[in-house]
Image (cartoon, rainbow, N blue to C red):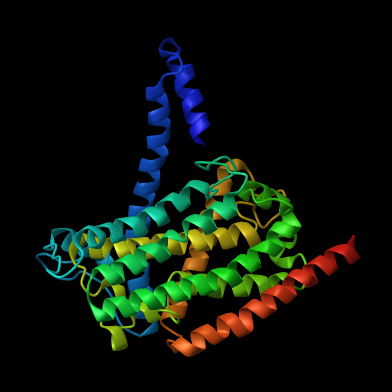
Amino acid sequence: MTVDFIFESLNKIFPSFGASDLFLIIAILLPCVACFTFIAIYGLVVIYAELKVSSFIHDKTGPMGQGVGLHAGKWGLLQPVADALKLILKEDIIPGSANKPLFVLAPFMIFVGAFISFVALPFGESIIVADMNIGIFYILGVGSLAVIALIIAGWSSNNKWALYGGMRSAAQIISYEIPAGISLIVVIMLAGSLNMQEIIRYQQGGIFNWIIFDNPFMPIAFIIYFISALAETNRTPFDLPESESELVAGFVTEYSGMRYAFFFLSEYANMFVVSAVAVTGFLGGWQSPFPNFLNSPSWSVFWMVNKTVFLIFIMIWIRFTVPRLRVDQLMHVCWKVFIPIGLFNIFGVAIWTVIKG
């Protein structure tokens, strides 16, 4: 369901208005509102899931509601809502020595970078806001906004811990974008397109036609991409930019209230984006794992969302089972392990494709 589809539908329903500019504005705004609503609801759900998964791994109860009076509802389902309301109602404090315009801009800038990535994500066979010929390239490009926003957040706070966190984050994201991009190059080589829908259609025919099983090099490419995605989203074991034991809270040290919430909503939104790209590139996207079974357009959303949610669950699981790396280990893995293996993968896939014919 693209902007063009909505615009044409409005023209058919109200032909007397002609090709009105108002219809074009509505056709652009409707997907934006839908995406924002989805991100907000998804954020609440994944926060609850993270609380419950962490409590299970730590052998704790986790959020739950008991007794009379105000509590978090049955099974603690309202805990994320309570946390969101708490942040919305908290006082918005801006340090006196901070650069106010940039301090205010940073959280919105990082959220916009995550938000506009959803434009190119295929949620189903016919559900995509903008079906771009350069879909993967677009997502990698707008993802770079996060680097600028985090540096701005760290520098504008006029706080050494925030600045250290911003610098770490910039170095980390820029470094790990390289192996992530290299891993996606082999996907583009096989599918012959940057268009995300075309990449998914290339994998039709069941689970063994998925790109991850195309040749012996693709599982390695998937692992490199997924670990690099953890680093790009600042998730454990790569959460060095906000490591509480060293930098208080990193680049968000001076933030409070809704601006603080925007940073973490963006983190969860980016988790969905990188997982959806992994599903699109390696795991068949909205294609059913069973050939000619549950593969209709109505099932495509189910498969796309559930595959993405599974990878998000793996990210949450890793957070509570793997310890944080040191800064030198982080850079060593990127530059001396992932990039050489990724480059070797490109040559391996090229040779395999030529031999296979």
Residue ID at (51%, 36%)? 2
Whole-percent x, y for residue 179 in the image? 60, 72
Q: In this view of the protein, which residue sits in the foreground, 119 or 57?
A: 119
Question: Where does the image place residue 152, in percent across and percent down from the top left?
Answer: 32, 65
Q: In which quarter of the image is residue 164?
A: bottom left
In the visual, does 42 lie left or right of 353?
A: left
- Please determine whether, in this image, residue 121 is positioned above or below residue 89: above
Quarter of the image where one finds residue 357: bottom right
242 relative to 130 in the view: left or right: left
How many numbered circles does the render carry?
A: 0
Residue 40 seen anywhere in this rendered image of the structure: yes
Residue occupying image coordinates x 69% and y 79%: 341
Q: Is residue 80 visible from the viewing direction of this image?
A: no
How far across and how far down the image is residue 239, in percent?
40, 79
Q: Which residue is drawn at 31% across and 64% down?
A: 263
**Residue visible at 30% across and 76% down in the picture:** 163
Q: Outermost residue toward the top?
A: 16
Residue placed furthest toward the left = 69
Q: Nearer the viewer, residue 168 or 272?
A: 168
Rendered location of residue 24, percent (x, y): 42, 27
Seen from the viewer's position, the closer of residues 210 and 146 is 146
